[in-house]
Image (cartoon, rainbow, N blue to C red):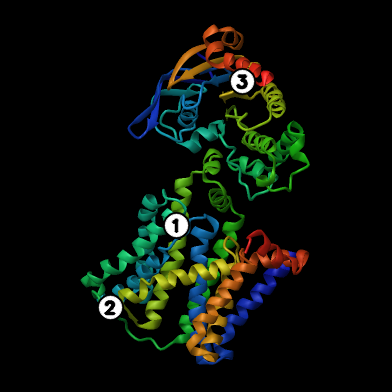
Amino acid sequence: MKSTAWGIVLAVIVALLAALPWIGNTVLVQFGINVLLLATLAQGWNIISGYTGYPSFGNSVFYGLGAYGVAIAMVQYHLPFWVGMLLGLGLGVVFAGLLGLAVLRLKGHYFAICTLGLALVMTAIVSNLEIAGSNIGLVLPLLRSEVLFYELALGLLVLATLTIFWLSRSRFGLGLIAIRENEEGAAVMGVNTTLYKVLAFMLSAAFTALAGGIYAYYITFIDPVGVFDIGLNVKMIIMAVFGGPGSVLGPVAGAFILSAISEVLATKVTSIASMFFGIVIVIAVMFMPRGIAHLVQHIKRMGWGYFIDNVRTHRL
Amino acid sequence: MSDALLKTTRLSAGYGEMPVLRDVSIDIQPAEIVAMVGGNGAGKTTLLRALSRLIPSRGDMSFDGRSIAGATADQVFAMGLVQVPEGRQLFDQMSVEENLRMGAYKRRDMTAIKDDLERVYRLFPALAGRRRQLAGSLSGGEQQMCAMARALMARPRLMMVDEMSLGLAPVVVDLLLETMTQIRSQGVTVLLVEQDVHAALSVADRGYVMETGEIVREGTAKELENDPEVQRAYLGEITVSTVTVVKS
């Protein structure tokens, strides 16, 4: 009964979000597109890092590949948008598969540093590809339909979240969690760790690349520095970690809340907005290091003690 | 000897260019408890990792009459060759019961899994009272029980236990060894890999002694315990140190 109630609440929220373009104004819709795409990226990161335990700094690469897939298909070959999305999806997933076979042998910090290095290298590589418009970038045909982009982004986020919901109760997802908790232990319990890790990386890349594709057509101009941006990768990590990595809805909540805070700060205090944003992050890390999802599960039972307990156990 | 459950013929394995195992030939009969003993760095864990197909090897090995030299880790696991790894390798942030359910990860027979859960709780009553507790918060002995119970949940035909006694109090080791004979009576064959030679030989039917990657002695547990060479190298030490402790 309880899960049905939850399902109804979520369905109502999604319906309200879907109706937003007819209720709110253009500014809200534009803000919405950004938030929905960021939430999708946070969910993508959640799969490989939250569930599988491999902290990726290379997810911005899949975002860039998705964006360039759409741009190259539409600008260089005059193909329709959806073909570009498929191209971007293919590029991202295949790249994640090949990359995963190589770098998923590394663990923890080594994996993080390796993927970070790769993200930096990608900017340089794409800047030298003529088909990708070198370092100047590509200008896509203009489509003045923010509502369409908004609904597409919402659809993608719902798809990503449903996938993670399935993951959280599937045998495959349980295998990923086992890898996160103890990879050696998972291997001796019959989990094909290499296969699972690579599949998780590809799944993560798929949603990230699709988000990049939507972004490219929406923003109409992309260049290497803009779409292979490490800053974006940091953003998705902060949002997923703030919300609760390894949970179904945490990263979405994280993306929505942090985007709202950052937007309010940017309009109210402008010049020192990022400092305030930093303070919010520091407070979050001190008082709820396991994210909103964990907080919601434990606050009822522990009350204010939850925050005190966190500060005490982490010796801050 | 042809109906051995596990048989290796001139098995060699190592890490990169470093050979660790050289021409290891062993066999294990169904429902036996076999001890593989030897000092630190003798290659015992490497042998287990090769048998579990976690590292590549040369030479032939067969399980239940079928060659497993070309099999993958999850294939031999599915055949019933299950390892209790050194250091337990539990899922610390999961509860005891979740750990046990991970042991049944490859199985789909839900009702049989439930029965098996109750069966391993009967085997390890200490775990039964701690079903909801996080595995990482258990004592060393309980963690070892949890690791063995997790392996049993996979319905192994051969359970390979690596350094069970490591870091445990002698009274706990005795309890676990006692459980080992119960496990065997339920039809599970056991390969006990141990540095604690005396403990391992006390429950084993047969044993092998390994030194620098080679089998140097084999025989029944009694023969090995009475073997002057084994006594000098492994068992004699214990007597000497006990005497020293008493003196001081």
Kind of residue at disc 2: Gly
Quarter of the image holding residue A94?
bottom left
Residue B20 left/right relative to B145: left
Residue at (71% x, 29% y) in the render: B172
Kind of residue at disc 1: Phe
Residue B141's place in the image compared with A299, above or below, is above
Which chain letter matches label 2? A
Which chain letter matches label 1? A
Q: Are marks 3 and 1 on the same chain?
A: no
Question: Between A19 and B177, which is closer to the camera in this rendering?
Answer: B177
Looking at the rendered structure, the secondary structure element under dot 3 is helix
Q: Where is residue A77 drawn, in percent x and y? A: 26, 74
Do the residues under discs 3 and 2 have CB atoms within 8 angstroms?
no
Mark yes or no: residue A118 visible.
yes
Question: Between B8 and A225, which is closer to the camera in this rendering?
Answer: A225
Looking at the rendered structure, the secondary structure element under dot 2 is loop
**Of the two numbered discs 3 and 2 in the rendering, the one whose residue sits closer to the viewer:** 3
Label placed on residue A137: 2
Per the image, the residue denoted by label 1 is A201
Quarter the N terminus of chain A occupies: bottom right
Per the image, the residue denoted by label 3 is B200
Residue at (55% x, 7% y) in the render: B227
Residue B27 left/right relative to A97: right
> What's the CA distance linking mark 3 and mark 1?
43 Å
> What's the CA distance linking mark 2 and mark 1?
27 Å
Which class describes the residues within 10 Å of circle 1: few (<14), some (14-19), or many (20+)? Answer: many
Looking at the rendered structure, the secondary structure element under dot 1 is helix
